[in-house]
Image: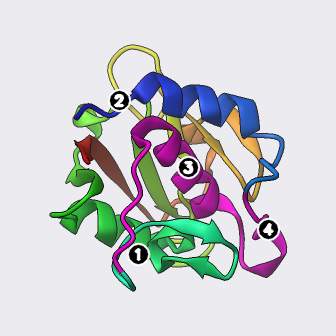
């Protein structure tokens, strides 16, 4: 089934500077960026994968998959998921669309931040891609404004399996 990019982006705009009370705020215990990214992804997919350990789901702060809140696990789930839920691939910048995700290594050499792409003005580039994120709450922030960027990768969401 298709991924509802508009719903994911609308959710990002609504909650970029706030916290949805249905989800725990991980800000003080490692960051909330991938939790927020997962919420946006769920808003656009409507399907979780309840596979123990390797799935992607959230029931509460103590009952969630590592992929719901962990940067590398989020990437691994989306790019390797052959089962239920959203799936995607490691994309080139030219392939991204609003509702997709970018992962950044800014202050450390490993990937540690997961913003959601909320708009692209023209041809995708660091200057034309705008993101929303938690842990450094932002909405419509130019991707190019992340001054230190050791590396980045894009995740394009292909669809959702029910």
Q: Which mark is residue 115?
A: 3
Residue extent of the magenta highlight: 23-51
Residue bearing the label numbered 4: 27
Q: Which mark is residue 97?
A: 2
Q: Which mark is residue 73?
A: 1
Residue pictured at 74% horizontal, 59% vertical: 135
**Residue 154 percent location from the top left of the image:** 34, 50
How far apart are the alpha carbons under marks 4 and 1?
18 Å
Residue pictured at 75% horizontal, 54% vertical: 22
Q: How many marks overall?
A: 4
How far apart are the alpha carbons under marks 2 and 3?
13 Å
The reply, left or right, for residue 119 in relation to residue 26 is left
Q: Are marks 1 and 3 in contact (CB under 8 Å)?
A: no
User: Is residue 39 shown in magenta?
Assistant: yes
How far apart are the alpha carbons under marks 1 and 3?
15 Å
The reply, left or right, for residue 132 in relation to residue 2 is right
């Amino acid at each position: 089934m298709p991924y509802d990019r508009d719903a994911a982006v609308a959710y990002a705009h609504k909650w970029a500077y706030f916290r949805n009370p249905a989800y725990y705020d991980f800000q003080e215990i490692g960051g909330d960026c991938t939790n927020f990214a997962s919420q946006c992804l769920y808003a656009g997919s409507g399907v979780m994968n309840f596979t123990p350990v390797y799935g992607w789901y959230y029931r509460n702060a103590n009952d969630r998959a590592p992929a719901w809140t962990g940067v590398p696990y989020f990437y691994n789930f989306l790019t390797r998921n052959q089962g239920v839920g959203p799936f995607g691939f490691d994309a080139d910048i030219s392939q991204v669309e609003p509702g997709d995700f970018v992962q950044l290594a800014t202050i450390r050499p490993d990937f540690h931040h997961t913003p959601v792409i909320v708009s692209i003005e023209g041809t995708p580039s660091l200057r034309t891609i705008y993101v929303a994120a938690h842990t450094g709450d932002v909405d419509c922030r130019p991707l190019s404004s992340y001054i230190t960027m050791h590396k980045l990768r894009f995740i394009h969401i292909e669809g959702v399996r029910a």
